[in-house]
Image (spheres, helix red, strand yellow):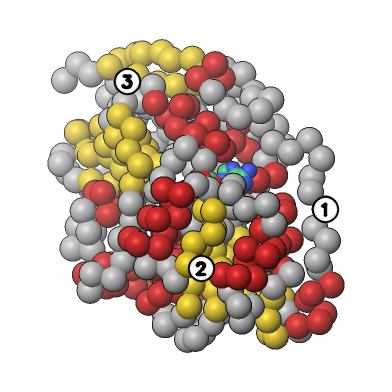
Amino acid sequence: MLLTNHRLLLAARPSGIPSPANFTADAMPARTPGPGEVLLETVYLSIDPAMRSWMSEGTGYQPSVPLGEVMRGGGIARVLESRSEEFAPGDLAQARLGWQTHPTLAGRHLQKLDLTLGTAEDWIGPLGLSAVTAYFGMRDVGAIRRGDRVLVSAAAGGVGQIAVQIARIEGCRVVGIAGGAEKCAFVANELGADAAIDYRAEKNLSSAIARACPEGVDLYFDNVGGPTLDAALARLREDARVVLCGRISQTHATEPYGVRNLNRFAAVHGRMQGFLVFNYRERYDEARAWLAARRREGRLNQRLHVLQGLAQAPIGLGMLFRGENTGKLVVRL
Ligand SMILES: NC(=O)c1ccc[n+]([C@@H]2O[C@H](COP(=O)([O-])OP(=O)(O)OC[C@H]3O[C@@H](n4cnc5c(N)ncnc54)[C@H](OP(=O)(O)O)[C@@H]3O)[C@@H](O)[C@H]2O)c1
């Protein structure tokens, strides 16, 4: 089989929001698999804010992608040819595929999808890493309790929409913060949040949170950091927990925002904790079994924002930082 592997290589480190100018495209014959390897056809690529840090030097929790190399990224692929005993043509697997259409990878770096849990769309969506992040963030780090008053930022996004639904499933009152009326309608009407706050339309976010959360906040799941985090801290209740999942609002800030309301933690005997989903990798199966069960019960959904074609991957990455995605951003190839 003569196949062409189309690739996107990191060509220049970004100074602001990433764009197609940071990448070059090339094409080469797909590599025939050696012993233990498989040739794959990429089906979905997941586009994640963390990729921005992988493009720069020394800013992330992982080594930066070297210039001239295929951009790093996870996704789902179909096996075309296999010289691994674990895989057969037609199998679906997830892996760090990179931004390329036909990678050849060692079978030991792939995880075969368990299709009894869900389809390929489920594995990139409600069973994917964003959903798994929300699971560990809400349950382990946030120690969610029935009846908690929960607040979630970037509530219409990949991680946020699962966090909102987990709060509902756990019998909590939940309020989502999102940018724009359309996203807020989605958070309230489709995700079932008790209220949604459009932070772009609010002059005083702290007052808006006070109105939407009249009894205060027991658990704040923070995806954005900066002034939103500060506004939420002002509303914490006794024994509150703040989960630092992400700080996307600060990615391109020239001066990092100095959080002012830290004194609330002493006043309410609260705590704030960050986490990295990769540190829970031994327990991904547990998370996916829980998420798949809630999905079967019809209580959990994940809206995907789907772009078509490899060339859209850099465009999609930029969209995350402008709030142009509604839902988990993926590229279908
Ligand atoms: N800790 C972990 O292991 C882990 C794992 C995965 C993701 N994360 C973090 O979780 C967060 C969400 O990731 P995701 O993949 O689900 O992305 P996402 O929420 O689907 O997309 C990013 C969203 O962030 C919001 N945003 C962008 N710039 C903003 C700004 N300046 N101020 C406020 N909001 C802004 C936008 O929503 P609005 O239009 O509503 O503003 C945008 O749609 C990110 O911070 C990411 O780094 C952490």
170 with respect to 150 (left or right): left
> Residue flagged by tag 2: what amino acid is it?
Val
**What residue is disc 1 on?**
258
Comparing labels 3 and 1, the label whose residue is closer to the camera: 1
Counting residues from the start of the chain, the first of labels 3 and 1 encountered is 3
Q: Nearer the viewer, residue 89 or 154?
A: 154
**What residue is disc 2 on?**
175
Of helix, strand and loop, which one carries label 2? strand
- Neighbour class for label 2 at 10 Å: few (<14), some, many (≥20)? many
> Residue flagged by tag 3: what amino acid is it?
Asn
112 with respect to 164 (left or right): left
Quadrant assignment, res 325: top left
- Screen quadrant of the C terminus: top left
Of helix, strand and loop, which one carries label 1? loop
Q: Is residue 64 visible?
A: yes
- Marks 2 and 3 sit apart, C-alpha to C-alpha, by 45 Å
Q: Is residue 276 visible?
A: no
**What residue is disc 3 on?**
5
